[in-house]
Amino acid sequence: MKNIVLCFDRARDHPGPREASNAEAVLRLLEESDEQITWYHPGTPAPASERGRLGRLRWREAAAHDARTTIAEAYEFLVEWWEPGDRIFMFGVGLGASCAHELTRLLGTVGVLPDLMDYVLATYALPRTRRSPQDWQRVTRLAARLAGHREIGVPVQFLGLWDMAKAPCRQETGVTNVVAGRHAVAVDGGNGSLAGRLVEAPESVEEVWFRGAHCDVAGGRGACWPLADIALDWMLDGAVQAGVTVRDDSRCEAPAPSEYDALAESPRTISLRRLPASPLVHASVDVYLRAHPEYWRRLPAQVVWADADWLARSERLVDARPSTAVEPPVLAAAAS
């Protein structure tokens, strides 16, 4: 049994390592061995947005094609290396997070089919039109018959996403084959028309909101790195708990965020995101709120603090305390 780790990045447009996204940062911390192999996709540049209805249609088609190509390449890697009993870990940022999410759904639908890979990918797995949940159930039954197995879905041991973008090829069905997962979402948005996709499987994927714009959560060019490191540390902690292995010499490179990092300032965008009722919000935001109570205006009336032990986490396997609900006493004054 081995770990297979797949990392989906955005377009690689950074000149140096400090401008790498959090997906690439995780990759650099992981152990490479016979017991754990990795795959990395740098992402493709987002197609230039065109004006007009026809231009928008061309943009959507180009973006969907790039996403399908990325997912197909990752699936081919799994066909080559995956064996029954192996554990799959996935990480992704932005559009890369959407690709990781769609590949997870694909694995839950048709599993890993070496002999039928091209047929399944072309005909069923990466459709150009939306499929209903009933459609996917039929695809699963057909794939099981073709493979000669009753149970065909393959679980994903850990799904780690940073501020997943809205990809034109996304499907409306959720993912049910995730053992554990985390999704770091930016309170302050900032990814243009691609922003704002949430995970459809809240039972197994912990979705937590972090202060900052898209790049402040996902990392990359223009990021406020103290904030990006908070989201990276939280994600890495969950992945290690799920069984991923980091290098022995990576502890000095891994983030160790502090209260000073939580107070870091970032150019704020005009937040267009509406948070759900009683969302999970990372406890680092509470540190910022004590110094800047006006930030409550960006949050709903009641939030649930997540990862309460983030400051005390000196090792990766510290169990987090149960999340606690809070209703801010200063909300009325701050919002007035």
Image (cartoon, rainbow, N blue to C red):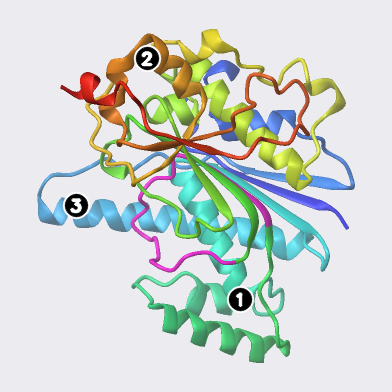
| Three-letter code for the amino acid on which mark 2 is drawn | Ser
Does residue 165 appear in the picture of this structure?
Answer: yes
| Mark 1 burial class by Cα count in 10 Å: few <14, some 14-19, many 20+ | many
Pointer 2: what residue?
266
Pointer 3: what residue?
56
Q: Secondary structure at mark 1?
A: helix
| Three-letter code for the amino acid on which mark 3 is drawn | Arg
Q: Residue at x 40, y 58 (%)?
A: 65
Q: How far apart are the two marked residues, 1 and 3, measured between alpha carbons?
A: 32 Å
Give the mark, 2 or 3, whose residue is nearer the N terminus.
Answer: 3
Q: Nearer the viewer, mark 1 or mark 2?
A: 2
Q: Secondary structure at mark 3?
A: helix
**Does 46 lie within the magenta span?**
no
Pointer 1: what residue?
110
| Three-letter code for the amino acid on which mark 1 is drawn | Val
Query: Which image quadrant for residue 279?
Result: top left
Q: Which mark is residue 81?
A: none
Quarter of the figure with the N terminus: bottom right
**Does 166 lie within the magenta span?**
yes
Q: Residue furthest left?
A: 52
